[in-house]
Amino acid sequence: MANIKSAIKRNKQNEKRRLLNRVYRGSARTRIARARIAIEGENLEAAKAATMAAIAALDKAAQKGVIHKNNAARRKSRLMKRLNAAK
């Protein structure tokens, strides 16, 4: 464990950020999974809505710096590719 005051503070900050990052990353993962399930299903309108929600979550995570913007772009591209193939 850290003994230096600045290191203790840094650990506290890192823990707070880790918990916040988990929210954004987890939300994006959940919405991507829901979108993939919806795409495999019958209803294309539901699939499109789920895909848009997943894209919004990815954009939010990239905006917050939780994931890299290119990572978000790649995942969005793959989702849209699946959605268009389902059509």
Image (tube, helix red, strand yellow):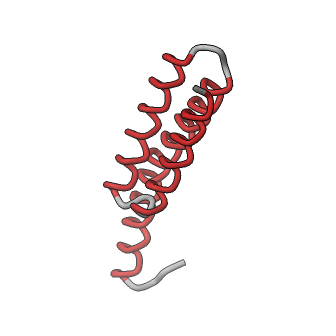
- How many tags in the picture? 0
**Which residue is nearer to you in this view: 25 or 58?**
58
Counting from the top left corner in percent of width and height, residue 47 is at 54, 23
In percent of the image, x 44 and y 63: which residue is there? 70
Query: Quadrant where the C terminus lies?
Result: top right
Instruction: Answer above or below: position of 4 versus 61.
Output: below
Query: Quadrant where the N terminus lies?
Result: bottom right
In percent of the image, x 43 and y 71: which residue is there? 11
In percent of the image, x 36 and y 61: which residue is there? 65
**Which residue is nearer to you in this view: 11 or 38?**
38
Q: Is residue 2 left or right of residue 43?
A: left
**Which residue is nearer to you in this view: 61 or 75?**
75
Q: Determine which quarter of the picture holds residue 56.
A: top left
Q: Determine which quarter of the picture holds residue 72.
A: bottom left
**Which residue is nearer to you in this view: 29 or 77?**
77
| Residue placed furthest toward the bottom | 4
Q: Determine which quarter of the picture holds residue 12.
A: bottom left
Counting from the top left corner in percent of width and height, residue 68 is at 43, 64
In percent of the image, x 66 and y 19: which residue is there? 41
Counting from the top left corner in percent of width and height, residue 83 is at 56, 33
